[in-house]
Image (cartoon, rainbow, N blue to C red):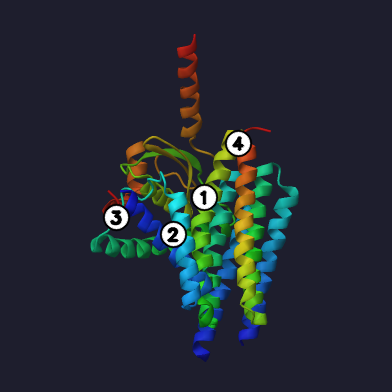
Amino acid sequence: MINTILIISAGFISLALLFSLYRFIKGPSVSDRVVSFDIITISSLTLIALIAYISGRSIYIDVALVYGLLSFIGVIIVARYLERGI
Amino acid sequence: METLEIIGAFILLSGSIFIFLGSLGLVRMPDVYNRIQAGTKASTLGTLLSLTGIALMTPSWWSRLLLLAIFIIITNPVSSHVLARASHKAGIKLSKRTVSDKYKAYNQAKEEAEHGNES
Amino acid sequence: MKLKSFIVSFIILMIVWLLLTSSFDLAYLITGAVVSAILSLLLCKRCTIFKGMKLNPMALVYTIIYLFVFIFELIKSNLDVARRVLSPSLPINPGIVEVKTTLKSPMARMILTNSITLTPGTLTIDMVDDSIFIHWIDVKSTDKTEATEKIVKRFENIISKIYD
């Protein structure tokens, strides 16, 4: 029962990753790509937390924390770069 | 114990559905600002719900998951706001369905005032 | 004034440390206390972020009320955006409007704009003096006072109770 629900939610998150990847490849401007990068990061952050539950290791939660921090800094840096004009 | 796990699994499922809807919005929306609207925020709620579900399934992890949730609540609006302002300053156009753009009007008025002072 | 911001930032850093380690060993506690004290001394030399904060029981009650209002608004507006994304004709009506705020303290303004951004449908783009520019996915009125009434008021009333 619980296993089935976990597999279905992992499938939804993977579909979300696929759609954002489509926008990442097609996106006409730089901002579109950064937005889809942000969403890819946040979906894979959820996926890491899900994998931490499935494998039963709490250390993966720390990995997710550092991952979120790095993605936040990356988005801010690209945005600053855009604002000054390319 | 068993019922708590099942409730947590259903909350996790609803969170992943919200993440999916966010990325669907990312594909369907016409311009950058609407994509930021639909994408980042639906996936924020989705991630929060998923973390809540995992915290219900394994109660001993609640403190780190709470820290992760607070971190996401604080940083996500900041990054989407910075991105929106940067795209507006970089001159990325709004879609054709846009009704009003007060920010552009404000910036033009400011520029004209500065020009007036110089000449 | 300096002492208050030192105490507030020390408590926040200590709570983060306790959540991260999730243990009450003496060694952990001492390490965390020393590191948070040094950090808040270094960071709070000139900081004025916590200046307008009220430290009394009523502010705590209003903080909890604000959390509940915020979560309710978050879920309600997320369902609204999900409906827009799923419907085939894509019923959006976007635009950038200007609203006014009466809050003065920088921390209160940060909380207000973050709340506006986190409830989908509205996205803060810039803030100049007292006016905030907001991208609204479904513009109901471009008039300044009416938009303020619709977007800002529901949060501002509660935040003004917590901050001066």
Disc 3 designates what residue?
A: C162
The answer to whether dots 1 and 3 both sit on one chain is no
Q: Which residue is mark 2?
A: C37
Label 1 sits on a secondary structure element that is helix
Q: Which residue is mark 1?
A: B78
Residue at 61% across, 71% down: A61
Residue in the foreground of this view, choosing between B73 and C141 = B73
Left or right, C161 with respect to C140, comes to left
Q: Residues within 10 Å of mark 1 (few under 14, many from 20)?
A: some
Nearer the camera: disc 1 or disc 2:
2
Amino acid under label 1?
Val
Image x and y of residue A20, in percent: 68, 57
Q: Is residue C47 above or below residue C30?
A: above
Q: Is residue A15 visible?
A: yes
Residue bearing the label numbered 4:
A83
Q: Nearer the viewer, residue B118 or B24?
A: B118
Residue B27 visible in rendering:
no
Q: Residues within 10 Å of mark 3 (few under 14, many from 20)?
A: many
Q: Secondary structure at mark 3?
A: helix
Mark 4, secondary structure of its residue: helix
- Measure how far apart labels 4 and 1 are at the Cα level: 15 Å
Relative to B30, say whether C73 is above or below.
below
